[in-house]
Image (tube, grey):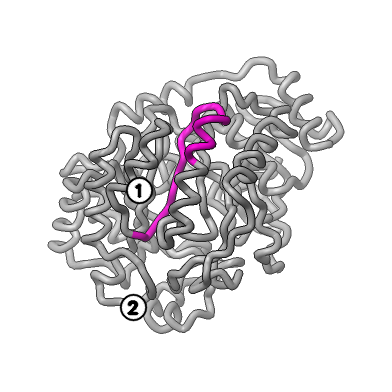
Amino acid sequence: MQESANGGLRRVAGDGRQVTRAAVPLVAEHDSWITVDPILGCPADCAYCYLGPLGLRAARPEVRATPEMVVAAVEDHLYGRRAGVIDPAYDKTPLCVGNYTDMVLTRPNRDALVRIVELLAERIPRRPVVVVTKGRLDADLLSALDAPGLPIYWFLSQSMARTAGVPLERGPVADLDTTLDNARLVSRTTHQKAVHFWRPFVAELRPSHADLEKLVGRLATSGLSASVVVGLTRGPGVPLADERLVTLLDQSMAAPPGEGEVFDDEGWAEAREFAVAAGYPLYRNTSCALAFLSGRPEALGTWRPPFVESRCLPAACPIAQRDRCAVAAAGEWTGGATLAARVAAFLSLDAGLVSVTAGELVIGDMIDEFDYNTLLHGYGRHMAIRAQGVRRQKAWLGSFTGGGIAA
């Protein structure tokens, strides 16, 4: 067992296994959203991408489910076993389409995305749809996606590597100007918003102090709603042997092996200073940006230990949004025995292994990563979710699941 970020003990089973493409579910619960993955393979070739070890980087996208099959699978997921702990009629967990491809980089991917959104609007209780992309958007695509009326949150991934002259990315990947053009296009739609996904945020890619100030200013005036800043993830599912990482990000790769995420703290302090001055939100967790976009409290508990000191308080977050989260933090859960019984049934555990007490849902056993995340989506806003350990089920372990805290 190993020490977790919150000071408790945790176990992550399966860290020595290679997650394969065959193991990628069509629908699964990730940290910040439910992911829907009908297409595997991305034409881009980014050195730091988790698709590398899966053989899905610089790969032709392969369709494994039609839009109709996808939405049927989402219905089955929401109204199946999950409904025992989360009522789909009230659930607002976002649906992210395409975590193992880029839904914008090819015409078939774009067509599939539009049809999936149309069907979701017809058949699924209303909730946001998330799309992460490095591609170039256009008015026709955005118009087609706007028509069904679902809220769509774009996470425009932009590392600044090309601006820094560091060749970490190959293929049809947007440069900074294209990303900002994308944001401006999104800002003209009715139902869509855009966030800048700033990753990997490492020292080798940091511009000068003056250039960073200009950069944040450009982000703030482009139509972007916020930036989410993420470091270089290390560990299972990450292509650590990629020669580009080893040679171009040698300082970051030389960090102590125990660091699961290499992050440019000095650059963050500078960027945060400029963001505050510009009135531009800057977050460390995707869930915080999702909350800000939707005008709701953050759903996973970034505002409570162990994340409050490292992820919540340092963020450049508007006061109104912090007030929303403060309301959630002050809330108390009633009916703990009923919830404990429901969770035990969901996990097929003896009732004595699950309890609700002092703002915590405590599970006295190892549980699957996707089950942990399901409970996080249902109850993370109300209480901490603590388990003896988590069995990893995807190529990377999110920060919340990675903090799967021992009872």
Q: How many marks?
A: 2
Q: For this view, does 395 lie left or right of residue 265?
A: right
Q: Give residue 41's quadrant in the image.
A: bottom right
Mark 2 — residue? 167
The local secondary structure at tag 1 comes to helix
Q: Residue at x 73, y 58 (%)?
A: 13
> Mark 2 packing: few (<14 Cα in 10 Å), some, or many (20+)?
some
Indicate whether residue 398 is drawn in magenta. Answer: no
- The stretch drawn in magenta includes residue 129: yes
Q: Camera-side residue: 53 or 278?
A: 53
Of the numbered discs 1 and 2, the one sitting upstream in the chain is 1
Residue for badge 1:
141
Task: Specify the farthest residue to the top.
Answer: 334
Q: Is residue 123 above or below residue 212?
A: above
Quarter of the image with the C terminus is: top right
Q: For the magenta stretch, what is the residue range? A: 117-135
Position of residue 93 relative to residue 135, above or below, is: above
**SS type, badge 2:** loop
Name the residue type under label 1.
Answer: Leu
Q: Residue at x 31, y 58 (%)?
A: 136
Asked whether residue 63 is in view, the answer is yes
Give percent across and percent down for residue 199: 38, 60
Disc 2 marks a residue whose amino acid type is Pro
The x, y position of residue 79, in whole percent, is 69, 30
Location of the N terminus by quadrant is bottom right
Asked if residue 306 shows in the view, the reply is no
Q: Measured along the vertical axis of the image, is residue 211 above or below residue 27?
A: below
Q: Which mark is nearer the camera, 1 or 2?
A: 1
